Amino acid sequence: MTYIVVESCIKCKYMDCVEVCPVDCFYEGENMLVIHPDECIDCGVCEPECPVDAIKPDTEPGLEKLLKLNADFAKIWPNITQKKEPPADAKAWEDVPNKLETQFSPNPGTGD
Ligand code: SF4
Ligand code: F3S
């Protein structure tokens, strides 16, 4: 198994998660982060750190599409290990539905 980042991260991108990961397996897109499934050691430390509950074990049902998204983009986005300033409008995006369909960006972030 692995932990993965799910839809609620999109446009919120608080980055509290990256500070606690012992193996630095978070990767940064323009609007969200992903976890590299082959690098994550399943420690679970990051899960309670996310203010919007965007980190889940992939054993939860219905996460196949997001597992693939994490695996695919972790290969091409830059590594991130230090928290930066979240988006100024992050709060406004917390409860917006269907962000994966409407707001996901394949563009990379800037990383560390
Ligand atoms: Fe990192 Fe542990 Fe979270 Fe995996 S579960 S991303 S190893 S902090
Ligand atoms: Fe995203 Fe939560 Fe980390 S919003 S960047 S998974 S702390």
Image: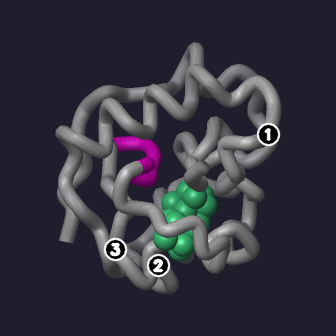
Give how far across and how far down residue 93 sits, in percent: 67, 43
Q: Is ligand 1 within 8 Å of the beta carbon of the residue shown at mark 3?
A: yes
Give how far across and how far down residue 91 sits, in percent: 69, 56
Q: Amino acid at mark 3?
A: Asp
State the residue position of label 3: 24
Q: Quadrant of residue 78?
A: bottom left
Q: Ligand 2 is found in which quarter of the picture?
A: bottom right
Name the main secondary structure of what is drawn in magenta: loop
Residue 93 in view of the camera = no
Q: Is ligand 1 within 8 Å of the beta carbon of the residue shown at mark 2?
A: yes
Q: Nearer the viewer, mark 1 or mark 2?
A: 1
Q: Which residues are magenta?
A: 30-37
Q: Nearer the viewer, mark 3 or mark 1?
A: 1
State the residue position of label 2: 21
Identify the residue at horizontal 51%, vertical 84% (top origin). Answer: 20
Q: Secondary structure at mark 2?
A: loop
Is residue 81 positioned above or below 79 on the image? below
Dot 1 alpha-carbon crowd within 10 angstroms: few under 14, some 14 to 19, many 20 or more? few
Identify the residue at horizontal 34%, vertical 74% (top origin). Answer: 24
Which residue of the protein is positioned furthest toward the top in this rendering? 101
Q: Quadrant of residue 101?
A: top right
User: Magenta stretch: residue 59 in it?
Assistant: no
Which circle's residue, 1 or 2, is located before the other in the chain?
2
Identify the residue at horizontal 76%, vertical 57% (top origin). Answer: 53
Q: Quadrant of the C terminus?
A: bottom left
State the residue position of label 1: 60
Q: CA distance from mark 1 to mark 2?
A: 21 Å
Residues marked 1 and 2 touching at CB (< 8 Å): no
Is residue 37 positioned above or below 17 on the image? above
Is residue 41 positioned above or below 27 on the image? below
Residues marked 3 and 2 touching at CB (< 8 Å): yes
